[in-house]
Amino acid sequence: MEERERSSGDGSSAEQYQNMTRKELYQAARAKGLRGISRCKKAELFAMLTGAAPPGPSVLPGAGQVADVPGSSELSGAGRGAPGTEALEEPPSEVRQEPREVYVDWGDPLPEKYNLDKIGAVAKDPNWIFVHWDLSGNRRHEVAQAYGQEIFTTARWHLRVLDLDRSEYVDLPIDVKVHNWYVPVSEDGTFKVAVGLLAGDGTFIEFASTGEIRTPRSRPSDSVSEEWMVADEQFQRFLKHAGTAAASELSSAELAARFRKKPLQ
C-alpha cells in the first residue's frame, strides 16, 4: 500500500518540518549531520530533510562523500572531471555562528528626584521659555508648618513669570507633577520665573525661583550706526611713521612698501 505520509530516508515525517522556519530547518539539518547547508534556502533544507528532490548534493552521517545526483555537476563545481571518479568529497562548509547578545552597561538609572527645591529655565526661542523644577526638598514641610497642611488642597500651583523690563508679572496655573512647562513670553526681554502656591486671597507662596533669563530678538538689530574699529597701538605707530598726510593719500600696498623701506625702531 502506498504510504499516506511522505518520509525521509531516516524515517522523519515531512509534516514535522512543514511549519518550521528556515533557522529551525537549518538546526535540524545540522543535527542530522548534513553538510554544505549554510547557504541553502528554506525550500532546499526542507527537501534535503524529507528526501524530496534534493536541490543539490547532500551527505548522510558518516558517508563522507557527495552523492552523484542529477544536476549536481553545476553545484559541485570543478573537480568532477577526474577520470574514474564518481564522487568527490565536499570541501568544508562555512560555519555560521549565531549572533551573541551584547551586554551594554548603561549604569544606574537617573533618579526621579534629588531632594531639592529648585527650578531652572532656558529660552527656547524669542517667544518661549522652557521651565523645569524639582520640589522634593524641605520647602513643603516649611510651608505646611507655616500655613497648615490644608494649604496644599485649598491653594493652586502656579508659575509666576516676572517681566523685569516692564516691572509686571503674570501667574500661570500648572500641573506641578509634570515637572516642566513652556511659558509664553515676549521677545527681547528679561524675565524671572518662580514656582509656588497661589492662595485664594492672592498670596503667592514661593517654593523656588530662577535667575534672570534673556530672550533673543526675532529680527536683526535696529541699530544701523557705523562703528569703526579702534586701531591698535602698533597700527598707530605705523601711520605716524608714514606721516599723517601721506597716510591719507596712499593705499595700503603703498603704505606697506614705505614701511618696508623704513622699518619702525
Image (spheres, rainbow, N blue to C red):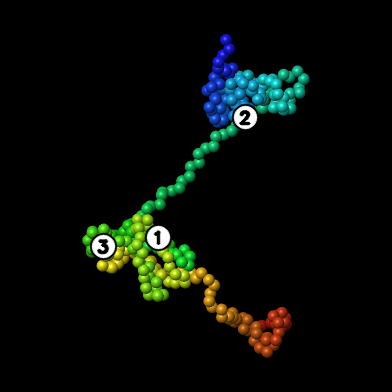
The percent position of residue 50, horizontal first and vertical second, equals: 58, 21
Q: Residue at x 69, y 27 (%)?
A: 75
Q: Which residue is mark 2?
A: 40
Q: Residue at x 41, y 49 (%)?
A: 109
Q: Which residue is mark 1?
A: 181
Task: Identify the residue at the far top of this view.
Answer: 1
| C-alpha span from label 3 to label 1 | 23 Å
The secondary element bearing badge 2 is classed as loop
**Quadrant housing residue 9:** top right
- On-image quarter of the N terminus: top right
Amino acid type at mark 3: Val
| C-alpha span from label 3 to label 2 | 74 Å
The percent position of residue 169, horizontal first and vertical second, equals: 36, 70
Q: Earlier in the sequence, mark 1 or mark 2?
A: 2
The percent position of residue 100, horizontal first and vertical second, equals: 52, 37
| Front-lying residue, 31 or 223 | 223
